[in-house]
């Protein structure tokens, strides 16, 4: 089983890229972020013709998350992260697919910092940590997938000073990420590639893609029953080179069949 996460950065605009990648990579489960479209405008028909069932939560102009399943229909378990009923951002959706509980996550960016957007980022991160603890304690096979908008360490970003004040690199979100992993979750890509940066995002500005000035922002975090099945993981960098591509590339993990 191949599970992937892909910040598509506008699903309608990048639909040709998404469909091309689905055909080439053939993942079994895909978590999408930054749909940037209303629910009724989600390209369900086109994705269905590619062989994928889908559940999604959209939002006009920004945010939005989805889960796709090859030749299957995801069964939604949550359409929002618990902890703040007043939060209307479409940043979390959770579904059962082929015996695994999958969460598609788009954590707030938090810029500019300091300020209310950064405070919202940290509060949202705390809610995610609390919910993740419950999922971990359940003992179920769970994958937390998505754009967590944090650069965990300096190894996860090209050598640059221009990001020094960016919310992605601040001590507080980095510490929150450490606490999340401390529950026991396995960072699939880093577990199998400890000595490579494994960037998943390259800004459109200043030819950062062409110069490989990247950041690692996208993650697949595996609970114990899933981590025991981990065979391979990587980043489909080629997708960042598509015409009018997203500024992110898909991140994937391959699991062996059966139980750990």
Image: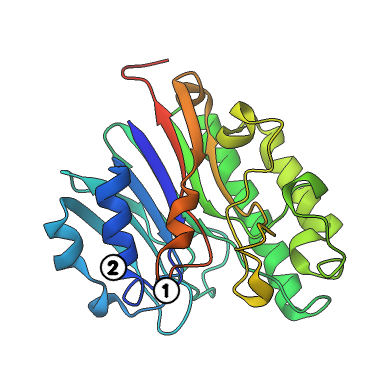
Task: Determine whether the residue tagged by mark 1 lies in a helix, strand or loop.
Answer: loop
Depth order, front residue of 29/248: 248
**Image location of residue 47, percent across then percent down:** 20, 61
**Quadrant where the N terminus is found in the figure:** top left
Neighbourhood count class around disc 1 (C-alpha, 10 Å): few under 14, some 14–19, many 20 upward:
few
- Mark 1 and 2 residues: CB-CB less than 8 Å, in contact? yes
- Location of residue 212 with respect to 11 vertically, above or below: above
Colour scheme in the image?
rainbow
**Image location of residue 77, percent across then percent down:** 34, 50
Lower position in the chain sequence, tag 1 or tag 2 = 2
Total marks in image: 2
**Image location of residue 240, percent across then percent down:** 48, 60
Q: Is residue 131 visible?
A: yes
Residue with the mark numbered 2: 16
Q: Is residue 177 left or right of residue 94?
A: right
Task: Determine whether the residue tagged by mark 2 lies in a helix, strand or loop.
Answer: helix
**Quadrant where the C terminus is found in the figure:** top left
């Amino acid at each position: 089983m191949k599970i992937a996460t892909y910040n598509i950065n506008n699903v309608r605009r990048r639909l040709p890229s998404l469909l091309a990648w689905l055909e080439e990579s053939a993942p079994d489960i895909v978590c999408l972020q930054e749909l940037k479209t209303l629910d009724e405008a989600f390209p369900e028909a086109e994705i269905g013709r590619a062989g994928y069932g889908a559940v999604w939560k959209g939002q006009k102009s920004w945010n939005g998350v989805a889960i796709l399943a090859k030749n299957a229909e995801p069964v939604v378990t949550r359409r929002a992260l618990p902890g703040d009923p007043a939060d209307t951002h479409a940043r979390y959706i959770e579904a059962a697919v082929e015996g695994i509980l999958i969460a598609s996550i788009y954590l707030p960016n938090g810029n500019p910092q300091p300020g209310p957007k950064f405070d919202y980022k940290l509060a949202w991160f705390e809610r995610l940590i609390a919910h993740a603890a419950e999922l971990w304690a359940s003992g179920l096979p769970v994958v937390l997938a998505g754009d967590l908008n944090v650069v965990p360490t300096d190894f996860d970003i090209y050598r640059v000073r221009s990001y020094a004040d960016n919310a992605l690199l601040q001590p507080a979100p980095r510490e929150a990420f450490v606490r999340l992993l401390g529950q026991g979750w396995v960072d699939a890509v880093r577990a199998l590639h400890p000595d490579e940066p494994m960037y998943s995002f390259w800004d459109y500005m200043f030819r950062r893609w062409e110069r490989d000035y990247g950041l690692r922002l996208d993650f697949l975090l595996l609970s114990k029953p899933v981590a025991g099945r981990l065979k391979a993981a990587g980043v489909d960098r080629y997708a960042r080179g598509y015409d009018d591509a997203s500024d992110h590339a898909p991140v994937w993990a391959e699991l062996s069949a059966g139980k750990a």
